[in-house]
């Protein structure tokens, strides 16, 4: 595969991941209770994605860290889609994309690692962005929106947990990690789904199947192939397409307009991400790329496109990771 084809594979994965709002905002799910709709989406999307990915699993091996990984992934899966339902697609995707900065704070507060100067400015941009979004949303007086924003922030925290555990499991088969995350997320939600007793009709089931296949499973396959010839730094830059496009699709398909403060906050967060994980790393790279340090992108196992996230337990400033585990 040529580099151009590899880049196109990564770009295609990011574009497909960005379609989450198209599926989650579909108006023919309006008869489902809004407070439970995100959880129901999370179950069916994970179920269909797991059915597609599990046949390709090789090198199955149990590790104790699989337990916190799948729990964090399940939490991310539910909170992200709940945020998508209760708030805007822009709020959901950009609040989740704070995950790299939650990882950074964890290294400071939990692992007691010193902050490098190149982390300060991006962190300030991200904090300003999230404070802007939270400040206006929490003062809006709309209860559903407040819960959605809280879930968006929480999905970023869970996502950070997925990334930290994935980095510790990077020697394991990536397809296995991706598939077990999806399968476990679905299994954990079975009791709630049975209790709710809400089953999709034929049209809804077809839509949910496409949700799991096109928005989750296929992007993982595309990204894993693209990473064979594309460096993790370049994949991160290309994958920033996802959070940019996600609210665009929601607007074009379902006429959802993000608030001005969401757009401004997203711009601040994007600036922080771009500075820290693209610009700074481009200057910091010395020696050959380390493809072994890159896991497949965050969305086949998580809910964002590939984001560079440091290793919280080893060298958190090594070559960035495209964590492919997005809820």
Image (spheres, rainbow, N blue to C red):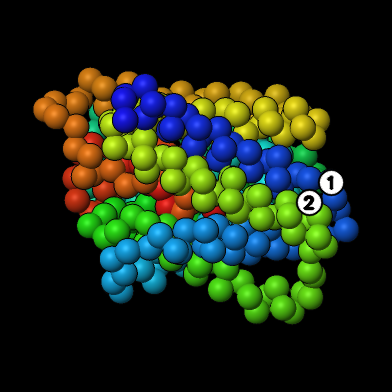
Badge 1 marks a residue whose secondary structure is helix
Residue drawn at 68 percent across, 75 percent down: 192
The residue sitting at the right extreme is 31
Above or below — where is 115 with respect to 186?
above
Residue drawn at 52 percent across, 62 percent down: 50
| Res 89 quadrant in image | top right
Above or below — where is 16 with respect to 68?
above
Circle 1 residues within 10 Å: few <14, some 14–19, many ≥20: few
Is 198 positioned to the left or the right of 247 in the image? right
Q: Say which of 263 and 58 sits in front.
A: 58
Circle 2 residues within 10 Å: few <14, some 14–19, many ≥20: few
Residue 202 visible within the image: yes
Q: Say which of 112 and 98 sits in front.
A: 98
Is 299 positioned to the left or the right of 140 in the image? left
Badge 2 marks a residue whose secondary structure is helix
Residue 125 in the image: state x and y as whole percent.
46, 27
**Residue at label 1?**
27
Is 326 positioned to the left or the right of 227 in the image? right
Is 245 positioned to the left or the right of 273 in the image? right
Residue drawn at 59 percent across, 60 percent down: 48
Q: Say which of 73 and 228 sits in front.
A: 228
| Res 237 quadrant in image | top left
Question: How far apart are the two marked residues, 2 and 1, measured between alpha carbons?
Answer: 21 Å
**Residue at label 2?**
143
Above or below — where is 247 with respect to 73?
above
Q: Say which of 210 and 69 sits in front.
A: 210
Residue 308 visible within the image: no
- Mark in the foreground, 2 or 1: 1
Residue drawn at 71 percent across, 47 percent down: 24
């Amino acid at each position: 595969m040529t580099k151009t084809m590899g880049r196109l594979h990564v770009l295609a994965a990011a574009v497909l991941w960005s379609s989450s709002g198209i599926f989650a905002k579909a108006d023919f799910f309006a008869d489902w209770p809004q407070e439970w709709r995100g959880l129901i989406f999370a179950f069916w999307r994970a179920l269909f994605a797991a059915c597609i990915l599990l046949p390709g699993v090789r090198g199955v091996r149990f590790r104790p860290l699989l337990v916190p990984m799948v729990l964090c992934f399940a939490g991310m899966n539910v909170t992200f889609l709940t945020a998508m339902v209760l708030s805007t697609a822009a709020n959901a995707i950009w609040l989740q994309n704070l995950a790299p900065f939650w990882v950074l704070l964890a290294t400071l507060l939990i692992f007691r690692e010193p902050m490098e100067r190149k982390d300060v400015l991006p962190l300030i941009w991200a904090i300003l962005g999230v404070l802007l979004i939270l400040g206006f949303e929490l003062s809006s007086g709309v209860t559903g929106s407040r819960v959605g924003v809280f879930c968006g922030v929480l999905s970023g925290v869970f996502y950070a947990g997925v990334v930290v555990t994935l980095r510790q499991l990077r020697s394991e088969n990536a397809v296995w990690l991706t598939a077990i995350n999806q399968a476990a997320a679905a299994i954990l939600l079975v009791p709630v789904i049975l209790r709710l007793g809400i089953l999709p009709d034929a049209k809804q089931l077809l839509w949910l199947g496409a949700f799991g296949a096109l928005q989750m499973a296929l992007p993982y396959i595309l990204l894993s192939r693209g990473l064979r010839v594309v460096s993790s730094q370049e994949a991160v830059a290309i994958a920033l397409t996802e959070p940019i496009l996600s609210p665009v699709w929601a607007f074009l398909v379902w006429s959802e307009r993000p608030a001005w403060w969401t757009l401004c906050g997203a711009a601040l967060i994007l600036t922080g991400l771009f500075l820290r994980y693209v610009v700074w790393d481009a200057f910091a790279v010395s020696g050959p790329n380390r493809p072994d340090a890159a896991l497949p992108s965050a969305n086949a196992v998580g809910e964002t496109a590939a984001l560079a996230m440091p290793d919280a337990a080893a060298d958190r400033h090594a070559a960035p990771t495209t964590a492919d585990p997005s809820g």
